[in-house]
Image (cartoon, rainbow, N blue to C red):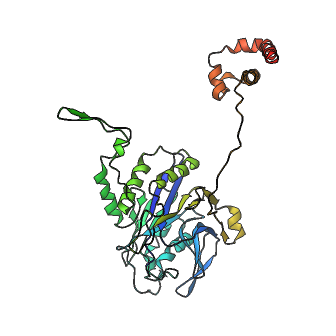
Amino acid sequence: MDNGEIMCTSIFTKTEDDKHFLARTMDFSFPIEGNPVFLPRDYSWHVFGKEMTNKYSMLGTGRGIAGNYIFTDGINEHGLAIAELYLPGEASYNKNEVKGKNNLAPWEFLNWCLGNYKSIDDLEKDLKNIRLVDVEIPIMNKSIPLHYIFADSTGRVVVIEPTGGELKFKENPVGVMTNTPNLEWHTQNLRNYLHVQPEQCSSKKYGEFEATPFSQGTGTSGLPGGFTPSHRFVRAAFFKEYINKARNELEGITNIWQILNTVRIPKGVVIEDSAGEDSTQYLAGICIESRSFYFTPYENNRITKVQITDELIDDGNVVIFEVPRKQSYYTPEGRIDHNDPETTIKEVIKLLDDIKSTKKGQVEGKNKEILKDIDDDFLKENISEIKELLDVIGKER
């Protein structure tokens, strides 16, 4: 049974106030049907007939599989964040279990890490004791080739690309991950795009003819536009590098959605050999410091935010946060624009009242511009007379 392949993009970013983010698109033809799910401390699940119990709570995109909630991305209460992506043709696993090791199916590895490690350093110390075993995932009846990207509050971002045997970290200097080929190939491939830049291309002479740019954006004309892993890697790396730096978490999530929208796959534009359609089923973004999880499904562009709180941890229940799949719209209430002399007079009176109790340097917005060349003492001394005059003008109108 061919259930298609996951074509995903993941990025790691940072804001000017030192917030760290791990984010991803989930591109797949097989319906994931995931929602943000919170798993509490001491959540128990089964692997190879044995019961595993997590030490730490976690929040991420989850779905029930074989009686367990399995995540495809998420964060735990200590700020360790992980996403798993496809690595077809390159990922390989061990064929047999080894006694004394933590033997896990590849699709259980993310849950195990979030449930048992506080940081990348914490996980690194125990990597030699984890063994990924080639086991089919029940809902798809196939082995899925995965690689994993990890981030935490230290700003470190690493990748595991299983090749059989002992697991090892690869440092990720770009902070981007897609699919096959491996990370080193994608990093080196960026050398083919040194000519791509935000600035305009300059004009060039060909004989007596001077070729000038048609319009803006000529510096980006070399960006690859397809949805292959290599094209998405280059686009994500470029936009992540040059987008205006975010100052805080709010701007950070806005930036992430703008970047990921450049690699987002609409239904119908990527058709597999098996006639399945790859599409971006959801976007997910994680702020490590605030333990916040942001989620947008294909069907609804609104961003849903869920957060690991002390109340959730103390409550100790599995919580599913159902995300609306139907498109929703925000309609603001209209405001009549009273741009007439009478309204202007009222605004001036309010401004004069402000002057009585506010220092000139503290006045904000448009009032600050109005006041910059006005003599404060004159206004304060004559405010009563000015108000009376404005009242007369208002009545006469």
Up-down relation of residue 170 to residue 211 (above or below): below
Up-down relation of residue 141 to residue 86 (above or below): below
Up-down relation of residue 190 to residue 333 (above or below): below
Decide if residue 121 is in sight here. Answer: no
- 229 or 356: nearer the viewer: 229
Classify residue 89 as left or right of residue 74. left
Classify residue 249 as left or right of residue 158. right
Q: Position of residue 114 (x, y in %)?
A: 55, 69
- 145 or 381: nearer the viewer: 145
Q: Quadrant of the C terminus?
A: top right
Classify residue 254 as left or right of residue 389. left
- 349 or 186: nearer the viewer: 349
Q: Position of residue 322 (x, y in %)?
A: 65, 66
Up-down relation of residue 373 to residue 116 (above or below): above
Decide if residue 131 is in sight here. Answer: yes
Q: Residue at x 32, y 49 (%)?
A: 222
Q: Quadrant of the N terminus?
A: bottom left
Q: Residue at x 47, y 52 (%)?
A: 259
Q: Residue at x 75, y 15 (%)?
A: 380
